[in-house]
Image: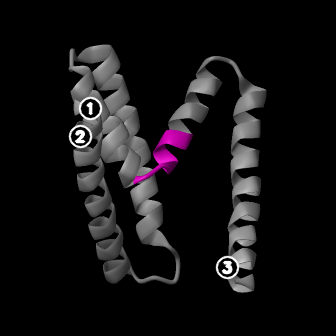
C-alpha cells in the first residue's frame, strides 16, 4: 500500500512538471513543432538513464525511493523514457531483433491505434 502512495506522489509531481515544462517551452519557442513534448521526452530519457544507473549501480537507495522517482515521477513525466530504457536494455543484452521490433511496432501500431481511436470517436 505504501508503494502505491509513493508512486502516486511521484506521479503527481511528474505530471505537473511535464505540463509546466512543455507549456513553457511551447510559449518560449512556438508551437509549430511539438518542441515542448520533444523536450520532455528527451529530458525524461536522460533522467531515467541517470537515475537507473545511479540508483541501481552507484547508490544504495530504498525501493520506495526508486518507485517514487522512476515509476512515479519519471513514469508520469514521460512514458517515452521507459520505452527508450527498455529498448536500450534489449540492445545491451544483444537482443537486436527484438529491440528493432519494439521500435518499429511501437511507432507503427501506436500510430494505427491513434487513428483507430480517432475514427471510433468520430463515429460515436
Callout 2–callout 3 Cβ contact below 8 Å: no
Identify the residue position indicated by label 1 in the image. Answer: 1
Q: Position of residue 38 (x, y in %)?
A: 47, 62
Q: Earlier in the sequence, mark 3 or mark 1?
A: 1
Looking at the picture, does residue 40 appear above or below residue 122? above
Residue at left offset 30%, top offset 49%:
11
Residue 104 - label: none
Residue at left offset 75%, top offset 47%:
105
Looking at the picture, does residue 54 appear above or below residue 15? above
Crowd around label 2: few <14 · some 14–19 · many ≥20 (10 Å): some
Q: Is residue 39 left or right of residue 14?
A: right
Between 62 and 58, which is closer to the camera in this rendering?
Answer: 62
Q: Position of residue 12 (x, y in %)?
A: 26, 54
Mark 1 vs mark 2, CA separation in Å: 7 Å
Name the secondary structure under disc 3.
Answer: helix
Q: Is residue 63 left or right of residue 100?
A: left
Between 109 and 59, which is closer to the camera in this rendering?
Answer: 109
Q: Which quadrant, please, contains the C terminus?
A: bottom right
Q: How is the image coloured?
A: one colour
Mark 3 vs mark 1, CA separation in Å: 36 Å
- Given this view, does label 3 or label 1 mark the residue nearer the observer? 1
Identify the residue position indicated by label 3 in the image. Answer: 121
The verdict on residue 108 being magenta is no
Identify the residue position indicated by label 2 in the image. Answer: 5
Between 94 and 7, which is closer to the camera in this rendering?
Answer: 7
Tell me the quarter of the picture where residue 121 sits: bottom right
Callout 1–callout 2 Cβ contact below 8 Å: yes
Name the secondary structure under disc 1.
Answer: loop
Amino acid at each position: 500500500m505504501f508503494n502505491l502512495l509513493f508512486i502516486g506522489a511521484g506521479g503527481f509531481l511528474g505530471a505537473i512538471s511535464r505540463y509546466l515544462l512543455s507549456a513553457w517551452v511551447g510559449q518560449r519557442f512556438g508551437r509549430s513543432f511539438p518542441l515542448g513534448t520533444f523536450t520532455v521526452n528527451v529530458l525524461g530519457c536522460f533522467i531515467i538513464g541517470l537515475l537507473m544507473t545511479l540508483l541501481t549501480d552507484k547508490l544504495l537507495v530504498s525501493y520506495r525511493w526508486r518507485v517514487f522517482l522512476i515509476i512515479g515521477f519519471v513514469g508520469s513525466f514521460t512514458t517515452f523514457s521507459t520505452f527508450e530504457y527498455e529498448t536500450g536494455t534489449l540492445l545491451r543484452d544483444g537482443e537486436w531483433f527484438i529491440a528493432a521490433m519494439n521500435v518499429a511496432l511501437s511507432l507503427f501500431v501506436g500510430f494505427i491505434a491513434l487513428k483507430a481511436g480517432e475514427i471510433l470517436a468520430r463515429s460515436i
